[in-house]
Amino acid sequence: MIDTHCHLYDDAFAGDRDSAIQRAVAAGVSLMLLPGIDSQSHASQEVLEAEYPELFRQMMGLHPTSVTADFEAELALVEQKLFHSGHPYVGVGEIGLDLYWDKTYLEEQKEVLRRQMRWARQLGLPVCLHVRKAYNELFGLLRDLNFGTYQGVMHCFGGSVQEARKAIEMGFHLGIGGVVTFKNATMADVVAAVPLQSLLLETDAPYLAPVPYRGKRNESAYIPIIADKIAQIKGISIDEVAAVTTASATQLYHL
């Protein structure tokens, strides 16, 4: 299985990073994708990928919650990395819109997202979108960009069935993580309503650990818990979930 979104470079793993990686491998995780957040995370990602080149692939992007009035320097670094570093990034991400914490920089977030979406298109790379309390704004921005069919994933998807179908119609996959295991999670309805081929497995570690670890640190070793929940909802085997989601991730990110 592939964990298509985790932050194993995060300080939450400072004490046992190598052990967490080995637990993931033992659990059947063959590859882990590392989204970029900002200049601070980029350096940590590079170290991790260099240590375990067979297990990690990097994305590059500026996260919406890292966007401030003075975003140009951070964005210039992303542009330099994508176009001039020679590094084979597998996607542009984690990018998007986040109105959960703060709406102060919405226009700046939109400008940063538009530019990164255009870079991804220029480079032929998929995008990894972070969307929180901003699906209407995101769909409006995507309509305005008017790229036709998109390549990418709405990571940690948290929208409605209707929004899920709209995203899939535009070409996006849905990233399904630990939230699907939460009691009363509407994500179960989404998973039931959309094709398995449109789903990707992810943890977002160290965040959003699945039941029975909810509230604790998440890690990539918990991917089978998420896959098993999807299998239960769909009434299929975990092996089928693993095979189909791995094939989808491999195709989307050219792994």
Image (spheres, rainbow, N blue to C red):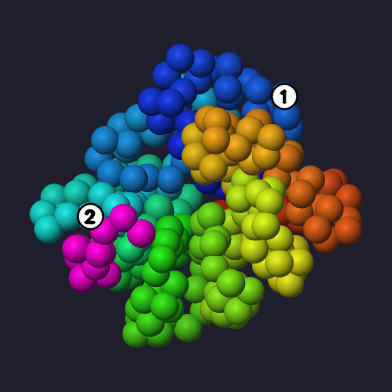
Badge 1 density bin: few <14, some 14–19, many ≥20, Cα 10 Å: few
Type of amino acid under label 2: Val
Q: Is residue 119 visible?
A: no
Type of amino acid under label 1: Ala
Q: Residue at x 25, y 40 (%)?
A: 39
Q: Residue at x 41, y 66 (%)?
A: 133
- Between 58 and 100, the one lying in front of the other is 100
Residue bearing the label numbered 1:
26
Q: Residue at x 62, y 54 (%)?
A: 176
- Extent of the magenta region: 100-111
Dot 2 and dot 1 residues touching (CB under 8 Å): no
- Between 193 and 62, the one lying in front of the other is 193
**What is the x, y in percent for residue 1?**
71, 42
Q: Which mark is residue 67?
A: 2
**What is the x, y in percent for residue 220?**
60, 34
Badge 2 density bin: few <14, some 14–19, many ≥20, Cα 10 Å: many
> Total number of numbered labels?
2
Q: Quadrant of residue 69?
A: bottom left
Q: Is residue 235 left or right of residue 246?
A: right
Q: Residue at x 71, y 71 (%)?
A: 194
Q: Who comes first in sequence, dot 2 or dot 1?
A: 1
